[in-house]
Image (cartoon, rainbow, N blue to C red):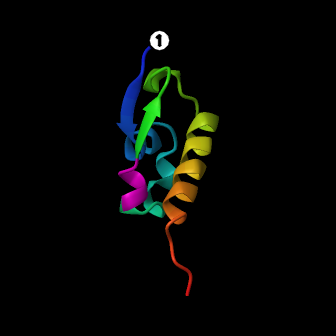
Amino acid sequence: MLVETVKLSTIVMRLTPELYPFLKRTELDFEIVLRNGLEALEAEDAMEIIQYSISEQQKDALLH
């Protein structure tokens, strides 16, 4: 099994580049561990990873 670590920006640029401008730098720099490598990802997988990454980044956010 191929395990690969990539930044979210790599996934976004490869599979959903239209979303790149809407993501924050901290979200784009989020490291993702892919169980089967980048080549095995599809657009639906990318969307799920993006949603998860955003929610992880918001866990520590303070609301005023």
User: Is 12 located above or below residue 45 in the figure?
Assistant: below
Which residue is located at x 56 percent, y 43 percent? Answer: 49
User: Is 19 located above or below residue 32 in the figure?
Assistant: below
Which residue is located at x 58 percent, y 49 percent? Answer: 52
Which residue is at the far bottom?
A: 64
Q: Position of residue 2 (x, y in %)?
A: 43, 15
Which residue is located at x 45 percent, y 54 percent? Answer: 20
Give the residues drawn in magenta, as a range: 26-30
Q: Classify mark 1: residues with Cα within 10 Å, few (<14), some (14-19) or many (20+).
A: few
Q: Position of residue 8 (x, y in %)?
A: 42, 45
Instruction: Please tell me whether mark 1 sits on a helix, a strand or a loop.
Output: loop
Which residue is located at x 43 percent, y 56 percent? Answer: 27
User: Which residue is at the front of the view, 43 or 18?
Assistant: 43
Q: Position of residue 36 (x, y in %)?
A: 49, 20
Q: Is 35 included in the stretch rendered in magenta?
A: no
Horizontally, residue 9 falls left or right of residue 61, namely left
User: Which residue is at the front of the view, 42 or 3?
Assistant: 3
Which residue is at the far top?
A: 1
User: Which residue is at the front of the view, 64 or 39?
Assistant: 64
Q: In the rendered structure, which amino acid carries the disc numbered 1?
A: Met
Horizontally, residue 44 falls left or right of residue 15, namely right
Quadrant the C terminus occupies: bottom right
- Secondary structure mostly seen in magenta is helix
How many numbered dots are placed on residues in this image?
1
User: Is 10 located above or below residue 59 in the figure?
Assistant: above
Q: Is 29 included in the stretch rendered in magenta?
A: yes
Q: Position of residue 32 (x, y in %)?
A: 44, 39
Residue at image mark 1: 1
